[in-house]
Each structure stands twice: as structure tokens, then as C-alpha cells.
């Protein structure tokens, strides 16, 4: 049996690199596990909320966000397949003094008791459930609002206030999502939803299957209203957040990948430095398999420690995020969801094994090569390059690079750019495998010099590129991924800035409320705003969500004031546009997700469900919309009002008379308009700055991981050079014997670090540019269906390259401090 000291001792000899390797593994595991916990907790709570709302329903009928005619309820309730039908009005109500809305559900308590018992008040007077101002809160809403029975909750409806009285509490074992209940008739009256409902929950008669009842029910539904199983909404919401979750998990894999490279670098150089010790073990009877197992065990220890730290840190991170930020991962679909972390053993084991497996893979090649080494040869000097001979073959790297290029041409898999991610991985691994050849090729073109330190450094790297490749791999990985993310983020940010400039031509913007369904501008409000002195022109917008496909989330319909012939200048169009011919259906302008998801094209005639009827429109053009991921359709508002009778608006843009300031007009609006103090008013510059601040916060995790990748790359280079210094003590001793000074040797090591990092920066920047193109045109487009223009942040990249080069040189010189001592002179005796 091999003593434990042989297993643990070599790891403890390099505590610094050991800690960094463990930290790199832990970082990747922690981020991936935290994202998984947060998303699973949010989905679980969303599912629980849906079960609370749907109860024992077999089917749920839903339509546009604004609701549909409540006459449909009577039709469905009379169907022979239906045992119980429960209508509901479900809104996210804008509360006065609160940023987040409160979900209020209006139900007929006598019907709901037969399907949705969790929506029946548990504490309060029975007659209160029928009163027009009675509101019942679940524990999550009660805690959030800090109210008690008899207190008043104020809801903003339009621009006016509606006061509701807390009359009691809902069942304490329901959802943790903030939820309130009212009588359905009272809610329709008080929240200005006459004759409208948003959902109907159906419980089928015994013996009637969902498969048999669904076609019959769907046949009586108007256009834009669908019947589905209750769990379908969970799948739709999960699919929306999947792209965000997968992208964050890919960032975690980046950290794991760089950690694996660091483990490989550390173990490879450890094998080189300990080749005599390992050969002696072989002579003493340790088999090749036993020696390889010993080295793999070292990597496994690093992986186990890193993975254990990672899963613990990931759980702690998830708890902190859920308590401070909430369950929303940036997609905006879990806003207001209160979720507790759920510990699932399966995912814990998966991420633990992933972290351990990456470390084992990083140790595999050095372990196998150490087992193959001939003991007699390894006991003498000159065996340093044996480990790296297998890294010199060019064909594996070429095959991987070509395969990566081919992967970029493949379509997404279930809406995810899996082949895009695979292309990035193949390009990165293939380029790293080609680095010895690339280094020799580039160094051969460095002009000869009479400076001894630079000349010796050049010859050392050109003749023995293998050891330098281990540190170079970490540099290339860190630089390429950092440059790629910098290019992608800069391209996205610049494109967003241009988009905001295009979409905000007015002098002042206002809306009734940022969140919720109850805040709007009535027709009377619009007339008063238009008639205000100083307003040259007012353009109003009505935004609502409609159902185009039962299997997909709702899309956004924008009814805007400007005429169709001006749309080509008012929307950021992509590609050709074509106004409909005379007599053709009117124009509809669709966003890029409508092209990718629904397969629409310019000139195609589409049917949109408006007010329960199917209306035909012609796709006149495609535009870029960074505000909505599920798709947007813009049509003329005058036509929308004529087809639906809906004269309300959600937003307005004001063009002011020259000489009238936006600030004075904002003050005038608040003073002159009834309820104007509740308006949200902003100038274009304020909206632009706020949008960019949100953008920068969204990429904070990306910036942090880029910094971690750079640190890991520098540590990898430092470890590589330090390992080479220890392995090349005879060489340094000989140089000292023939007259080179400590300063000259330090300069030579600094030159090696400069040349190595220069090659790494050159290759990393070129590879990063290619990966950036994949992120922009493949990953981003297939994930979120957004296009953007390429923008390379040259000043930042040049500053980054100069800083990396300087840090690499300093790291090389610090790592070579052992070459200055007397041990290197005595090391020459080993060959005497």
C-alpha cells in the first residue's frame, strides 16, 4: 500500500497553486449549483401558485392578458363534459406606494370552493366575501404589506385610487407567492373590468377524459382563447427562463474549464519536477497502473475538496440571493415570487461529481504519461520533454477547430444554442492543442537579437515549447473568453444605446404605472394631456399580451399612434420592408422573435385575435426589440381602437413646443391632471441611463467571472514558470557557472514570460474575436432571438492586453526567484 504521505505531501508542497485550483473548481460548481437551486425553487413556487389558483381543475381556459367576454363562462358551464366551471379575474394590481404589484384573483367563492378551496377565506366573516371592498390576503401578502384585518390597501386603477379593506386571510398552507382574493363581481366593478374575465377553471365529470373533452371545449372558444392542462403554464414559463439559466450555467462551466486547465498545468509540472521520485517508485516495485492511480488520486482530492466547497458555497449563495434579490434570474418572469431554497440530493450529487470529474480529467494525461515513462531514463536528466511529446501532434487540434466551425451552422435544439456552445468548446480546446505548433511558428518569426537574455528565452521556448504550453493554455483560455465576452457585451451595449436613441424620439415620456395591469390612461386623460399648453403633439401607445399559439407564451401587441408610412423611420427595422398594396390587409410590424419562433416573413398574411375575432394583417417589416423576448407585433392604434373598442393607453410620448422645457412640462402634468401625481414621467436621457444601468447590473456576474478567469490564467502562467524553474535548476546552475548573473537570469525569465504571454495574448485575442462572433450571431440569436451589430472595444482591449503582458512579466520574474539562490549551482552536481 502506498503511504498517505506520498499522496498528500506533493499537494501540500504547492499550497498556493493547490488553493487556486480548489477555488477555480469551487467557483464553477458554486455558480452552477446556485443557479440550479434558485431556478428550481422559483419553478417549484410558481407551480405551487398555479396549483393554488387552479386547485382540482382538469383544464384551464385562458386568453389575452386583458381578458375575454365573461359570456363564455355560461357556455362552458353548460357543456355535458363539464362538472364544475369556476370563472376568475386575475390581475397584477398596481398598489400605491409599492414598486411590485399584488396579484388579486376575483372568484365566485361558492364555485371556487368546489375546485379551488385555497382561494376561499379561512378567517373573516362569510358575508365579507361578497362585499365590494373586501380583500383577503394570503400570509405572504400579509407579511409583505404589513397589514392587519381592517386596514386599507390602496390600488391604482387608471390614475385614480381605489381603497380596499383587508377583511380576512386565505389558507396559510397555500402558495408563498403574494396573493389576494376578492369577489369576482366586486373586482370587475372596482377594478374597472366590466364583463371581462381572464380564466375559467374546469372540472370534468367522472369518466370524461381530458383528451376527449379538450377538442369539444376548444371548438366553442373564440379566437385567441385556448384550453390547456394547468401545468402547461409552468412549462411555458420554465422555457422562457431556460435560456437565462443555461447561459449562466455555461459561465459556470467556463470557470470549471479554466480550473481543469489549472489542475492539468499543476499536475503536469509536478510530474516533470518529480520525475526522478516517480521513477524511483517504479524501481521499488510500483506498477504503471499504481503510479497512474497515485497521480489520479491527487487530482481526485483536489476535485473532491473543490466540489465540496462549491456545493456548500452554491447553497449559501442561493439562500442569499433568494433572501435579498428574489427568485428572478434576470428574465423578469419570477418578479415578486417568494421562494425558499430546495435541497435536491440528485442535483447536489450531479454538481459534486461534475467538479470532481473536471479535476480528474485535468490529471488524466499527466498520470498516464508518468505511468508510461521508462524508469531508467527518467532517473537521469534530459527527460523533461517526454510528458509533452503527445501535445505536439497537430491533427487532433485541427480536427477540433474544423468541427467547431461546422457546429456554428447547425440550428438550435429546443430553443437552446447547444451546438453554438459546443462550437466554442471545440474551438477553444483545439486551439490550445495547437499552441506548441503555433508558438514555434510565431517564435521563428521573431528577429534574432544580440541581447543574451532575450536570445536564450527565444531559443528555450522554440526548442522546448511543451512546458510553456501548460501555462499558455490557461492564458489562452482566460484571454479568449474575456475578449469574447467583452466584444459581446460591448456590441450588445452599443446596439442597445442605438436602439434606445431610435425608440425615444419624443421630448418627454409618461406612463400610468411601470408594473401591474390596473394602471392606464383613459380616453379622457389622453384628451387632457393633448390639450395641455406646450404640447405640440402627443403619441399614445396601448400594450397588451395576446395568445397566438397555445404551446407558447403570450406575445405583446403594441397599438401605436403614428401611421404605417412613418414606421420605417420610427422603428429600428431589419432588412427589407414592404407596405401592403391597396386592398391588402393592413400592416403589422413584427419583431425578430416572431421570425425565429413563428417563422413569419415580410409580405406574409397573418391572423391576430382581437376582441375574440381573427383579424388579418400583412407583415410589412421586421424590427429589433430588446425589451421583449417572446415577440412583439406593432399595428396602427386607430385601427386597433376600431376593431376592439379599447380606447385606453398605457404609455405616451410628448413632443413639446420649442422653448418649453421637459422639466416644467412634467411639473405641469402632475399639477394639472387629476391623479397626475401618480404618473411616471421621464425624459429620454433618464430612460436611457436607467436602461443602461440595468444592463450593467445584469452583466455583473459576467464581469466577476472574467476577472476570475484572468486571475486563474495568471496563476496558471506563474505556476508553469515556477515549475519550469524547479525542473531547470541544472540549466540555471550551468548558466551561473559560465558567468551569467542573477539579474541576467531574471531578465531571461522575464523575457520568457513576455514572449509566452505575448503569444497567448495574440492567439487569445484572435480566438476571442471568433468566439465573440459566435456569441453574437449564434448563441445570442438562438437564445433570445436578438440581433446586434459587432462592436470591438479597442481601447479597453489594448489596455487589457498591456496589463496582462506586464503582469505576466512580473509573475515570471517573481516565480523565478528560486533560480537566484545557491541551490541551482549545486544542482549541476547531480549530473557529475
Image (cartoon, helix red, strand yellow):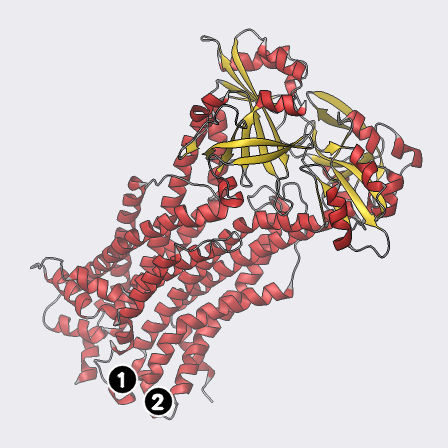
> Residue at image x 86%, y 41%?
78
If you read the primary sequence from the N terminus, does the residue marked by circle 2 or circle 1 appear first? 2
**Which quadrant of the figure has residue 426?**
bottom left
Seen in the picture, residue 467 relative to 193 is either above or below; the reply is below
Q: Which residue is at the front of the view, 546 or 813?
A: 546
Seen in the picture, residue 166 relative to 645 is either above or below; the reply is below
Q: Which residue is at the front of the view, 300 or 730?
A: 300
Local packing at callout 1 (Cα closer than 10 Å; few below 14, some 14-19, many 20+) is: many
From the top left corner, tell me how far across and down residue 293 is, in percent.
43, 82
Q: Which residue is at the front of the view, 767 or 138?
A: 767
**Which quadrant of the figure has residue 409?**
bottom left
- Per the image, the residue denoted by label 1 is 378
Labels 2 & 1 near each other (Cβ < 8 A)? yes
> Residue at image x 58%, y 47%?
240
Q: Which residue is at the front of the view, 56 or 28?
A: 56
> Residue at image x 52%, y 24%?
583
Label 2: which secondary element: helix
Q: Which of the image's four quarters has the C terminus?
A: bottom left
Seen in the picture, residue 586 relative to 349 is either above or below; the reply is above
Label 1: which secondary element: helix
From the top left corner, tell me how far across and down residue 743 is, in percent.
17, 61
> Residue 78 vs residue 299: left or right?
right
Seen in the picture, residue 485 relative to 312 is either above or below; the reply is above
- Per the image, the residue denoted by label 2 is 282
From the top left corner, tell me how far across and down residue 436 is, in percent.
24, 66
Amino acid at each position: 500500500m502506498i503511504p498517505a504521505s506520498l499522496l498528500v505531501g506533493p499537494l501540500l508542497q504547492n499550497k498556493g497553486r493547490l488553493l487556486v485550483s480548489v477555488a477555480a473548481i469551487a467557483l464553477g460548481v458554486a455558480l452552477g449549483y446556485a443557479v440550479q437551486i434558485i431556478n428550481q425553487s422559483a419553478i417549484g413556487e410558481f407551480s405551487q401558485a398555479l396549483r393554488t389558483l387552479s386547485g382540482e381543475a382538469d383544464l384551464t381556459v385562458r386568453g389575452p392578458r386583458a381578458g375575454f367576454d365573461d359570456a363564455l363562462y355560461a357556455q362552458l358551464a353548460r357543456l355535458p363534459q363539464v362538472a364544475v366551471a369556476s370563472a376568475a379575474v386575475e390581475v397584477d394590481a398596481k398598489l400605491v406606494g409599492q414598486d411590485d404589484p399584488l396579484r388579486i384573483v376575483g372568484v365566485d367563492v361558492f364555485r371556487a370552493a368546489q375546485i379551488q378551496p385555497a382561494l376561499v377565506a379561512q378567517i373573516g366573516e362569510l358575508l365579507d366575501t361578497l362585499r365590494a371592498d373586501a380583500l383577503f390576503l394570503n400570509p405572504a401578502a400579509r407579511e409583505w404589506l404589513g397589514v392587519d384585518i381592517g386596514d386599507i390597501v390602496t390600488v391604482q386603477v387608471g390614475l385614480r385610487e381605489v381603497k380596499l379593506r383587508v377583511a380576512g386571510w386565505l389558507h396559510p398552507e397555500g402558495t408563498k407567492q403574494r396573493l389576494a382574493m376578492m369577489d369576482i363581481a366586486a373586482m370587475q366593478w372596482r377594478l374597472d373590468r366590466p364583463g371581462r374575465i381572464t380564466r375559467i377553471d374546469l372540472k370534468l365529470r367522472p369518466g370524461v377524459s381530458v383528451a376527449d373533452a379538450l377538442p369539444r371545449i376548444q371548438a366553442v372558444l373564440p379566437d385567441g382563447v385556448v384550453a390547456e392542462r394547468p401545468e402547461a403554464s409552468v412549462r411555458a414559463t420554465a422555457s422562457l427562463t431556460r435560456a437565462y439559466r443555461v447561459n449562466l450555467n455555461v459561465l459556470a462551466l467556463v470557470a470549471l474549464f479554466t480550473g481543469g486547465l489549472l489542475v492539468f498545468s499543476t499536475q503536469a509540472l509536478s510530474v516533470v519536477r518529480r520525475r526522478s521520485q516517480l521513477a524511483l517508485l517504479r524501481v521499488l516495485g510500483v506498477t504503471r497502473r499504481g503510479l497512474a492511480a497515485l497521480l489520479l488520486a491527487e487530482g481526485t482530492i483536489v476535485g473532491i475538496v473543490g466540489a465540496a466547497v462549491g456545493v456548500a458555497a452554491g447553497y449559501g449563495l442561493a439562500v442569499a440571493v433568494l433572501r435579498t434579490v428574489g427568485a428572478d434570474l434576470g428574465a423578469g418572469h419570477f418578479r415578486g415570487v417568494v421562494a425558499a431554497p430546495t435541497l435536491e440530493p440528485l442535483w447536489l450529487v450531479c454538481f459534486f461529481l461534475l467538479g470532481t470529474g473536471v479535476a480528474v480529467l485535468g490529471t488524466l494525461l499527466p498520470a498516464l504519461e508518468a505511468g508510461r515513462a521508462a524508469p531508467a531514463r527518467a532517473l537521469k536528466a534530459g527527460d523533461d520533454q517526454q510528458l509533452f511529446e503527445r501535445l505536439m501532434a497537430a491533427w487532433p487540434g485541427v480536427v477540433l477547430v474544423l468541427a467547431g466551425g461546422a457546429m456554428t451552422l447547425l440550428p438550435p435544439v429546443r430553443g437552446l444554442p447547444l451546438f453554438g456552445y459546443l462550437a466554442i468548446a471545440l474551438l477553444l480546446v483545439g486551439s490550445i492543442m495547437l499552441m506548441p505548433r503555433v508558438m514555434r511558428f510565431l517564435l521563428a518569426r521573431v528577429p534574432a537579437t544580440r541581447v543574451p537574455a532575450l536570445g536564450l528565452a527565444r531559443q528555450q521556448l522554440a526548442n522546448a515549447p511543451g512546458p510553456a504550453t501548460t501555462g499558455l493554455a490557461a492564458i489562452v483560455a482566460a484571454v479568449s473568453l474575456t475578449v469574447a465576452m467583452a466584444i459581446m457585451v460591448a456590441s450588445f451595449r452599443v446596439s442597445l444605446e442605438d436602439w434606445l436613441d431610435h425608440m425615444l424620439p419624443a421630448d418627454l415620456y409618461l406612463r400610468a404605472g411601470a408594473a401591474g395591469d390596473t394602471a392606464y390612461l383613459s380616453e379622457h386623460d389622453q384628451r387632457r394631456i393633448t390639450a395641455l399648453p406646450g404640447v405640440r403633439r402627443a403619441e399614445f401607445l396601448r400594450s397588451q399580451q395576446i395568445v397566438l399559439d397555445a404551446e407558447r407564451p403570450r406575445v405583446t401587441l403594441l397599438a401605436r399612434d403614428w401611421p404605417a408610412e412613418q414606421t420605417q423611420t420610427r422603428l429600428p427595422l431589419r432588412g427589407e420592408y414592404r407596405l401592403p398594396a391597396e386592398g391588402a390587409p393592413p400592416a403589422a410590424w413584427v419583431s425578430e422573435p416572431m421570425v425565429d419562433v413563428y417563422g413569419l416573413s415580410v409580405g406574409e398574411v397573418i391572423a391576430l385575435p382581437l376582441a375574440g375575432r381573427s383579424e388579418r394583417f400583412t407583415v410589412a417589416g421586421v424590427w429589433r426589440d430588446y425589451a421583449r423576448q417572446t415577440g412583439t407585433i406593432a399595428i396602427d392604434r386607430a385601427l386597433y381602437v376600431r376593431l376592439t373598442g379599447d380606447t385606453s393607453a398605457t404609455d405616451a410620448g410628448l413632443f413639446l413646443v420649442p422653448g418649453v422645457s421637459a422639466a416644467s412640462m412634467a411639473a405641469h402634468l402632475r399639477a394639472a391632471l387629476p391623479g397626475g401625481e401618480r404618473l411616471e414621467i421621464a425624459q429620454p436621457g433618464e430612460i436611457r441611463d436607467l436602461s443602461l444601468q440595468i444592463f450593467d447590473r445584469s452583466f455583473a456576474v459576467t464581469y466577476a467571472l472574467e476577472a476570475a478567469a484572468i486571475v486563474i490564467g495568471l496563476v496558471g502562467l506563474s505556476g508553469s514558470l515556477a515549475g519550469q524553474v524547479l525542473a531547470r535548476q541544472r540549466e540555471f546552475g550551468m548558466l551561473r557557472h559560465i558567468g551569467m548573473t542573477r539579474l541576467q537570469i531574471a531578465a531571461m525569465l522575464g523575457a520568457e514570460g513576455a514572449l509566452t504571454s505575448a503569444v497567448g495574448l495574440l492567439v487569445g485575442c484572435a480566438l476571442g474575436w471568433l468566439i465573440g462572433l459566435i456569441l453574437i450571431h449564434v448563441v445570442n440569436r438562438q437564445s433570445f432571438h436578438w440581433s446586434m451589430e459587432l462592436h470591438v472595444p479597442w481601447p479597453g482591449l489594448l489596455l487589457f492586453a498591456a496589463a496582462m503582458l506586464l503582469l505576466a512579466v512580473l509573475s515570471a520574474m517573481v516565480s523565478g526567484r528560486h533560480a537566484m539562490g545557491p541551490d541551482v549551482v549545486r544542482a549541476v552536481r547531480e549530473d557529475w
